Amino acid sequence: MKKQGRNSISRLYMRISTLFIGVLFVFAAITLYISVQAANNYAQEVNQNMNHDLAAHVAVMMEPFIQEGVINEVGLEDLVHSLMVINPSIEVYLLDTRGKILSYVAPEKVVKLEQVSLEPVTDFINLTKKKIFYGDDPRNPGELKIFSAAELIQDNRLTGYIYIILASQEYASAANLVRGSFIMGLSIRSIITILIGSALVGLLALWLIVKKLNRIIRGIRNFEEGDLETRIEVKSNDDLDEVATVFNSMANTIQQNIEELKGVENLRKELISNISHDLRTPIASIQGYAETLILKKDNIEPKEQEKYLGVIYKNCENLQDLVTNLFELSKLQSDQVMLNKEPFSIGELVHDVANKYRILSQKKGVHINTIVSKDIPVVEADVLLIDRVLQNLIDNAIRFCKEGDTINIELKS
C-alpha cells in the first residue's frame, strides 16, 4: 500500500511537471514571438517617423527634372540612383495620380507591379490615422512595407506622387543577416537560459509541494488502515499544513467518538448483564412457586396457596416493569420517543409521587421526606416521563433501604 502511494505521488508529480513545463514553453514561445514582432514593429515605426519628410525633400529635388508633364528620364534616374547609393535601404518610385508607376531605378524584371494602391499613400500624406502605414511593394506583390510619400505639385496642380519604400530588398537582406548575428544568438541563448532556470525553480517548488502532499496522503492512508494514533506533523502555516491541521482535528474527533462508542458498548453489555440478572430473579421465583403449587397443591393450605399466588403476581409486576423499562430504553436509543411538553409544577409532582409510595415505605419502616423550595419555577417537560423517572428512583430507593432509613427528596432552584 505504501509503495502504491509513492507511485501515485510520483505519477502526480510527473503529470504536474509535464504540464508545467509545457505551459512554460508555450508561454515563453508566445512571449518571444510577441517581443520580436513588437521590436520589429517599433523599429519600422521609428524608421517611418524619422523618414516621414524624405519623400517631400525628394519631390523638391525632382522638380527640375519634370517640366510641363515631361520627365527627364536621364536626369531623374541619376538623381534616384544617387539617393539609393547614399541610402541603400530605400527604393524610389514616381507615380501618376492613379498610382501607376512612371519611373524607377532597378534591374529589368525586378519591379513586378505596374500600379500601387493610393489609399495608404493619401492616408500617409493627410495623416488621417496615427499608426504605422504600410503600402504595396512593387518588387514583391502581396507584401506590404513601410514607406514615405509626397505629392508632386506643378502650377498648383497635382501631377503625381513620390513613393519611397523604406525597407528595400537590401534592407530586408541586412535584417535577415542581423537575425543570425551574434547579438541575436546571444539574446536567444539568454532567453533559453532564463527559461531553463525558471523551469528548474518551478520543478523544485513543485517537488516541495508534492513532497508535503505525500506526507499528508501517507498520514491519511495510515489512518485509513486502522492506525488511529496517526497524526500529521505541522511544520508551517501554509495552506497544505492547514489541511494537515484540519485532518489532525478530524482524527482526534473520530478517535474520541470511537472511544465514546466503545464506552457506550461496554455500558450496553453491562446493562444487558444486569437486566438478565434482574429478569432471572423473578422468573426463577415464579417458576419455583408455580412448581410448588403444581406438585403439592393437595398438601398446601388455601391461605398458603394464596400467599404463593401473591408472590407470583408480585414477580409478574416486576417483570412487567422491567420489560416496560427496556421498551422505553430502546425507544430512546432509536429516537422514537415523542415528547409531549407542557408546563407543570415539579414540586407538586414530587409530592404526588412521594405520597403514592408512603404506604409501601411505611410497611418497610422507611420514611420519605420531601423538601421543595418555594421559588421552584414552573418547568416545561413531558409529565408522564418525569413521573416515571421519579417512581423508578423512589422504588429503587425503597427496595435498597433498610428499616429505619430515610429517603430525602429535595428540590432547589
Image (cartoon, helix red, strand yellow):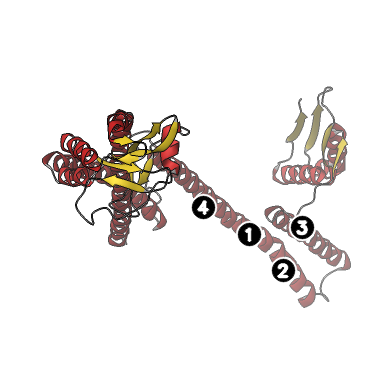
Name the residue located 31 percent from the left edge and 28 percent from the top edge.
60
Q: Is residue 89 left or right of residue 246?
A: left
* Residue 86 visible in the picture: yes
Name the mark nearer the viewer: 1 or 2: 1
Earlier sequence position, callout 2 versus callout 4: 4
Q: Which residue extends farthest left?
A: 182
Residue 262, disc: 4
- Give the x, y percent position of residue 96: 39, 43
Check the picture and name the quadrant holding the C terminus: top right
Earlier sequence position, callout 1 versus callout 3: 1
Q: Could you give the CA–CA distance between mark 1 and mark 4, rounded to whole angstroms?
A: 23 Å
Name the mark nearer the viewer: 2 or 4: 4
Q: Could you give the CA–CA distance between mark 1 and mark 2, rounded to whole angstroms?
A: 16 Å
Q: Could you give the CA–CA distance between mark 2 and mark 4, rounded to whole angstroms?
A: 39 Å
Name the mark nearer the viewer: 1 or 3: 3
Can you identify the residue that label 2 sits on? 288
Three-letter amino acid code at the position of disc 3: Thr
The answer to which quarter of the image holds residue 317 is bottom right
Three-letter amino acid code at the position of disc 1: His
Q: Are marks 4 and 3 in contact (CB under 8 Å)?
A: no
* Residue 210 visible in the picture: no
Q: Is residue 85 left or right of residue 296?
A: left
Can you identify the residue that label 1 sits on? 277
Can you identify the residue that label 3 sits on? 324
Q: Is residue 196 left or right of residue 374?
A: left
Q: Please say if 55 is above or below 280.
A: above
